[in-house]
Structure formats: structure tokens, C-alpha cells
Amino acid sequence: MQRARITGTGMFVPDRVVTNDDLSGLMDTSDEWIQQRTGIRERRWVEPGQTPTDLASAAAEQALADAGLEAGDIDCILLATLSPEHHFPGTSFFVQARLGCSETPCIDLHAQCTGFLYALSLADSLVTSGKYRRVLVIGAEVHSTGLDLSTRGRDVSVIFGDGAGAVVVEANQDTDDPGGILAVRLGAEGEHAMRLCVDAPASGRSPRIDQAALDEGLHYPHMEGRFVFKHAVRRMPQVLEQTLSAGGVKLQEVDLFLFHQANLRINEFVANQLEIPVEKTFNNIMRYGNCSAGSIPMLLAESSRNGRLARGDLVSLTGFGSGFSWGGAVIRW
Ligand code: ACO
């Protein structure tokens, strides 16, 4: 069967750097607490008026250039985000207009921190089934405009950052080259959906948001951090091993392990559990925080630029997030 392969990567983060010390000026927190618990030193926030479409389009343009393509060459746009530009239409439609590829179909996916892996899985199916030849997959988040910057929200607000990553997925036409997506595995446990969520605005409420909801802070993310942590460190090794087994790859053969960037301690825990050497991992959470659907494609873009990922390498991707949702992919780069 013809494989789908990633032929281009791109990323974009806003210029504005927000350090842990900047946050301790807004809420009762400290650089020491944030670094010890999460590994994060700084993150990026958008400037007023900068939107998910701005970030996503810049990342997409870079991925297209990297693949040697133009926007008009793309057959479908998949965009994963938990911080959409508007409730509707989906953010992918705004990105399509910005890229100038009118009439290209647009699909938004809502699977939070696992959103990119869900979108990659769909892109893989669309390409290997022959429905589309070239799919643009984007993960983009603007978290900073939706955070409770008072001490009430400190457990969540210190971990999130703004950023976007993108890849181009194409049919591998080269019969001599076995490169491509070898396996993707996804999972979910919806019974825990409310453990990490934003309550309002919501169509289950009428009106969808009101002053009482705003006063209660229901429009801010709510997270049962320890509960999420416990599930992340159980599900991530599980799905990583399932994915490698589905792809016929041994753990020792993998050249690079990229984990979703929610918390460096989660990733260290998972790597320890599976005895993955630290030199086979790459994290950027220290500089960008948790960019949810943007994190994994940002890691791919950075590691392919900085020489950590070369053609022919085996790379394993693993994520966990709200939903709860989780996923893994193994790729011959
Ligand atoms: N600064 C200082 N103190 C803080 C902060 C802060 N930013 N946040 C919480 N605290 C305090 C708490 O109030 C609490 O104080 P107390 O003991 O006096 O009550 C103490 O620190 C411990 O709080 P916990 O919430 O239990 O802290 P924990 O060690 O669990 O760390 C964290 C919190 C970092 C959020 C962790 O739980 C975590 O990473 N969870 C998983 C996150 C994740 O994987 N999310 C999924 C992806 S996100 C997505 O899908 C949208």
C-alpha cells in the first residue's frame, strides 16, 4: 500500500516572551514553583489583535515552502485547536482564505492536546485511501487570551503558551523509499471530559454565558491537575507501545521520541518507565509552555531544522490531553 509521508514542516510563535517572573507579578506564583513542577521557563503570548489564524497561516506557509509546494497544491486543510478563532465557522476556513487557496475543503478537529495526532491520523487515511494527494495539517492555539491571570487560575495559567505548527502530508510516490507514517493509534475516555474543560460559553446553557458565569470564572480552563497527571503517565506509555507494535518497530530502533509538551515531569516519567535514554528525546516546553495541538508539530519543525531528525530516522510521537484523549504515531522520516 502507498504510504503517506510528511514532506514539510513549519512553526510560528509570537514574538512576545512571558517569563515565569512576569507571571509572578500577576499572580501568587514563582519561577521556582513553575520550573520544579513543569520545567517551563517562559512561553509566548500573542500581541493584542493577533489571532490563531495569524499563527496557523505563518506555520502553514513555512510547511508549504519546506515541501516545495504552494497553497493551491493542497487538496484539504485539517486544523486542530481548542482555542478556535470563533465558535463557528472553524478556524481552518479563515486560514484557507489567508493562504489564498479558495475552494480547498476545510476541516476543524477538536481533540485538545491530542488534536494534532487525531488530525494526522485522518490525513494518513485520506492520503492512503487515495481520496486526496496532499493534506495540510495544522495545530494552532492562542491560550493567552483565555487564561485566569489571578491566583485562582494559577495551576492552569502558568502551563499554557501560544503557538502553531504545521505539516504537509503527501502520498509517497517513491517506490524505492519506505518512508512514511507506519502506524497511528488513538484512544479516548470521555467519562473524564469535565476533569479538564472550559464550561462556558456552552450551547447547553441558555444564555450560553452570563455575568454569573463570568464572575465564577467558568470561561476559564478548569483542570484537576493531579488526576490528569496520573492518567497521562498511564496512557502515554501504553499508546506508545501499542503504536510501535502496530508499526512493527522495536522501542530500541526509534531514533527520536517526541512527547506532547504538557509538563516536562510527565515526559521524564514516561521516558523513565520505558527506559528511553534522554538523548533520544527532545522537548521545547521550557521555551514555549504547553501549546496543546500546536506542540507536536512545533517539535517536528524544530527537530527537523536543528538536525535531530533526518530522512530515514524513526520518530515516535505521543500525546495525551483533555477529553481525555491520547494518541501515538510512528513515522519513518
Ligand atoms: N504557583 C504556585 N503554587 C501553585 C501553583 C502555581 N502556579 N499552582 C498550584 N499551586 C499550589 C496549589 O495551590 C497547591 O497548594 P496547597 O498544597 O497549599 O493546596 C500546590 O501548589 C499543589 O497543587 P497541585 O495542583 O496539586 O500541583 P501539582 O503538583 O499537581 O502540579 C500541574 C500542577 C503542574 C498542573 C500538574 O498537576 C500537571 O501537570 N498536571 C497535568 C497537566 C496535563 O497533562 N494536562 C493535559 C494537557 S492540557 C490539555 O489537554 C488542554
Image (cartoon, grey):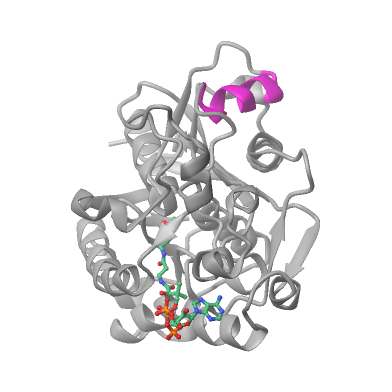
Q: Specify whether 121 is left or right of 34.
A: left
Magenta range:
89-100
Counting labels gives: 0
For the residue pair 241 and 139, the one nearer the viewer reads as 139
Q: Is residue 139 visible?
A: yes
Query: Which secondary structure is most common in the magenta stretch?
Result: helix
Q: What residue sits 46% from the left and 44% below the top?
A: 213
Quarter containing ligand 1?
bottom left
For the residue pair 312 and 28, the one nearer the viewer reads as 28
The quadrant of the picture occupied by the N terminus is top left
For the residue pair 328 and 41, the one nearer the viewer reads as 41
Indicate the position of residue 313 as horizontal and vertical percent values. Answer: 47, 64
Q: Specify whether 274 is left or right of 216.
A: left
Q: Is residue 178 visible?
A: no
Q: Is residue 92 magenta?
A: yes
Q: What residue sits 33% from the left and 67% below the top?
A: 228
For the residue pair 20 and 121, the one nearer the viewer reads as 20
Q: What residue sits 71% from the left and 60% below the top?
A: 44
Indicate the position of residue 258 as horizontal and vertical percent values. Answer: 46, 66
Residue placed furthest toward the front? 212
Indicate the position of residue 83 as horizontal and vertical percent values. Answer: 53, 42
Q: Is residue 142 magenta?
A: no
Q: Is 331 located above or below residue 268 in the figure?
A: above
Q: Quadrant of residue 259?
A: bottom left
Indicate the position of residue 80 as horizontal and vertical percent values. Answer: 47, 40
Q: Is 28 located above or below residue 102 in the figure?
A: below
Q: Quadrant of residue 285?
A: bottom right
